[in-house]
Image (spheres, rainbow, N blue to C red):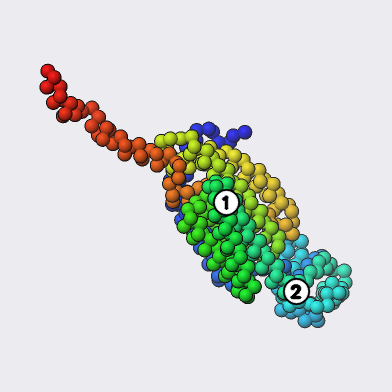
Amino acid sequence: MELIKPGTKINFVGFRRYAYAFSLILILIGVISLIAKGGPRYGVDFAGGTLIQVKFKAPTTPEAIREGMKALDMTEATIQTFGAADQNEFLIRIHQEIEKLEGLSQRVQKSLEEKFGPGKLEVRRVETVGPKVGQDLRQKALLAIFYSLLFLAVYISGRFEQKWIMSGIVAGAIMITAYAATLLGAGLGWLILVAGVITLIVWFVFKLKYALGAIVALIHDVTITLGVFSLLNKEIDLTIVAALLTIIGYSMNDTIIVFDRIRETLRKTKKTSFDQVINASINETLSRTVITSGVTMLAVLPLYILGGPVISDFSLAMMVGIFVGTYSSIYVASPILLIWPPETGKETASIMVKQLFKPAVKNQGKVPAKAVARGKKKT
């Protein structure tokens, strides 16, 4: 099945500067939002505290709920609607850990019933995470994302450039350095940021172009997804981390398909420039890319619309990731390969051929003067 007709010649590489500007704008908006809000908005999983989900039978307001919880000394809690407005469900977040979790549901229900009346509400969920547990989960989530990017870079370098040992040594050194720094008490967030920058620089210096293109695209996808969640004031919890790791795998798979076709095309062609090779490869895989992304989106969209508030944020992250991942494999990962000419590509061979035959081309159609003189002597 092909949605895109064979022989399509869209100049994707020619639009790369506009694509880079568009990506940079999206990333800057997200980063500015994250800085303005003091970082991502962590859920109870990462920030610690207590989460209480309450459903009311009649419409109410967060102010009324807060007033009804005065007896429990929870007036500083964060209260927000959960799901559609007509469902009358609310999430109550208490940022301090409540040590006595036993009986908390009954105490909350009793306190609110004194305000709203018996039988007017239902406490559906109570979750408590200690601050140390939340911090530990946050660190492990960051490390999971960082190490997944690093391992994928090693795989790409080995598969497309046959540099398993070099990329493995570099990745191992970065992992050991990061682990040693965490043992010494270094801040994990800044540590991963610095390690990521160093990784990109090392990959650039050693000309691991396929790995560099793939990793830049993955960082691009994760950053934009986090930026969208910051702009929408959504929480980051373990479910969203699972979505981010899924996005990384999905985007990498799409990028590998394009890279495979670029490598195959380089082996076949002899006189085509590298940018034309990339364009041809993207166009040849475009139908498969659109079908894969479209089918995945058709599976995720119903989850977002009908899955309810529990899974809506996960579905939103997946939808953003599918769109951005497809875009980055075409406009981010592939054009980065143009930084270096192909090592055994046909572009270099073409240039050499032109240089070798330049005198012949220049004098084409003209008889050399020495040949004319030799002809006169013979006559």
Q: At 55% from the left edge and 47% from the top edge, which residue is drawn?
A: 162
* Label 1: element kind: helix
Looking at the image, the residue that sits furthest to the top is 379
Looking at numbered disc 1 in the image, what kind of residue is underneath it? Trp
Q: On the image, numbered disc 1 is attached to which residue?
A: 164
361 vs 211, left or right, is left
Q: What's the CA distance linking mark 1 and mark 2?
A: 42 Å
Q: Which mark is residue 95?
A: none
Tell which tag, 1 or 2, sits nearer the viewer.
1
- Give how far across and how far down residue 207 sits, in percent: 47, 53
> Which quarter of the figure is the C terminus placed in?
top left
Tell me, yes or no, if residue 261 can be seen here: yes
302 vs 115, left or right, is left
The residue lying toward the viewer, choosing from 111 and 186, is 186
Q: At 52% from the left edge and 54% from the top edge, which residue is drawn?
A: 212
- Give how far across and how far down residue 304 sits, in percent: 69, 53
